[in-house]
Amino acid sequence: MNCEAARSSGSRRLGFVLAGFEASLSCEQLVSKTVSNTIRPMLDMRPNCECCDKDLDPSGTDARICSFECTFCSACAEETLKGKCPNCGGALFVRPPRAKEKLAKFPASAKRVTKPGGCKAA
Ligand SMILES: [Zn+2]
Ligand SMILES: [Zn+2]
């Protein structure tokens, strides 16, 4: 990442109140700060099942995901899909629940993803 990219993503993230503070940092400080804040390996924790659009609790164990984080409820994953992701063919596993107190700081994704037409039985 270069300085300009770090600066613009930094001010987008923090808003204009803190943009002045960011602007006072040196280029290296800014780049390392931005990289460490934005590249965090973390699951999306999608809010719904891609097949039936059922809501999935991010701190529960009803969600199933593949390695690409295609996300399904346990009923669709087990009964309809037989444990296999219909998008990539990968295996579906239980999504690790995120503790409720962590969700305040590391919120689950709010972006709903659904398969047009739902899922066909495997
Ligand atoms: Zn479902
Ligand atoms: Zn998949």
Image (spheres, rainbow, N blue to C red):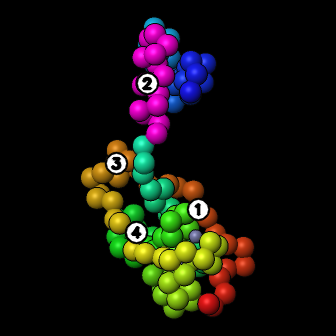
Q: Amino acid at mark 2?
A: Ser
Q: Which residue bears the numbered disc 2?
A: 32
| CB contact under 8 Å: marks 1 and 2 | no
Residues at marks 1 and 2, CA–CA distance in whole angstroms: 32 Å
Please rate how many residues cluster around mark 3, counting C-alpha atoms within 10 Å: few if below 14, some from 14 to 19, many from 20: few
Q: Nearer the viewer, residue 15 or 115?
A: 115
Q: Is residue 115 visible?
A: yes
Residues at marks 3 and 2, CA–CA distance in whole angstroms: 25 Å
N-term-proximal mark, 1 vs 2: 2
Which residue is rendered at x = 54% and y = 23% of the image? 6
Looking at the rendered image, the disc whose residue lies closer to the viewer, 1 or 4, is: 4
Q: Which residue bears the numbered disc 3?
A: 104
Residues at marks 3 and 4, CA–CA distance in whole angstroms: 19 Å
The quarter of the rendered structure image containing the C terminus is: bottom right
Answer whether residue 56 is magenta in the image: no
N-term-proximal mark, 2 vs 4: 2
Residues at marks 3 and 1, CA–CA distance in whole angstroms: 19 Å
Answer whether residue 29 is magenta in the image: yes
What SS does tag 4 mark? loop
Q: Read off the magenta span.
A: 25-39
Q: Amino acid at mark 4?
A: Arg
Residue 95, label in figure: 4
Q: Which residue bears the numbered disc 1?
A: 112
